[in-house]
Amino acid sequence: MRAGLAITAIAAGFAGTAWAQQAAAQGDARHGKAISYTCLGCHGIDGYKNAYPMYSVPKLEGQNPDYLAAALHGYRDGDRAHVTMHSQASELTDQDILDIAAYFAGKPLTATGKAQGSVPQAAALCVSCHGQDGVAIAPMYPSLAGQHQDYLVRAIDEYRKGGRKNPVMKGFAASLKDEDVAVIAQYFSRLTPALSTESRPYTRLTAH
């Protein structure tokens, strides 16, 4: 029952972003690749870390393009606090955002619907939307399978402290203890098939 209410609440929280559900169909991955040379400076290097505070830059390949588009809108509109990401996203049109999301997502992860071992109690509510195998149940939610553990900790902490202004996630995160956050991040980071880092096969000078 609690899980069902959680799904309903989160769906309501995303009601204003129905445009995102068409991201995969509208996004032009070719154009996204051509304009993503700056993005690849961080998201195209395996193991690259945000400088301060230090944490791993998220893996994006295999992610839902709808979610990536919504995240970029969040950075552009100020609903997510990150100076560099805001600066980059503020230069993008709505179509640019869809195109970049389509490029980085590539082929989104496919859900198995099965848990890999027992789901820890701390993550019991999380899997209602993010999936028992870490693959999100709907395109507007992020898949978490194989995501960097320290990035997941950072993301949850931002919801707790207001750096990300999703009211539903903020409410869930506020009830978590630090040890709960650590358990959740560890659980999802170990799941497979996993998100991966988009390769950076070219530079700005060779993009076409």
Image (cartoon, grey):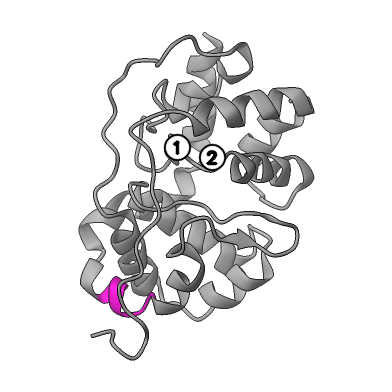
Residue 135 appears in the figure: yes
Q: Which residues are magenta?
A: 31-36
Q: Position of residue 2 (x, y in %)?
A: 56, 12
Residue sitting at x 53%, y 18%: 5
Is there a contact, CB below 8 Å, between mark 1 and mark 2? Answer: no
Is residue 33 one of those drawn in magenta?
yes
User: Residue beneath label 2, please?
Assistant: 13
- Categorize mark 1 by other alpha carbons within 10 Å: few (<14), some (14-19), many (20+): many
Residue 137 position (above or below residue 106): above
Q: Position of residue 159 (x, y in %)?
A: 69, 43
Q: Position of residue 104 (x, y in %)?
A: 34, 60
User: How far apart are labels 1 and 2 at the CA level?
Assistant: 26 Å
Secondary structure of the residue carrying tag 2 is: helix
- Categorize mark 2 by other alpha carbons within 10 Å: few (<14), some (14-19), many (20+): some
Residue 8 position (above or below residue 42): above
The picture quadrant where one finds residue 149 is top right
- Comparing 125 with 50, the one in front is 50
Residue 72 position (above or below residue 114): below
- What residue type is disc 2 on? Gly
Question: How many numbered marks does the figure carry?
Answer: 2
Magenta segment's dominant SS is helix
Residue sitting at x 31%, y 68%: 99
Q: Position of residue 29 (x, y in %)?
A: 24, 66
Residue sitting at x 60%, y 32%: 185
User: Residue beneath label 1, please?
Assistant: 146
Question: Does residue 133 appear left or right of residue 174 in this picture?
Answer: left
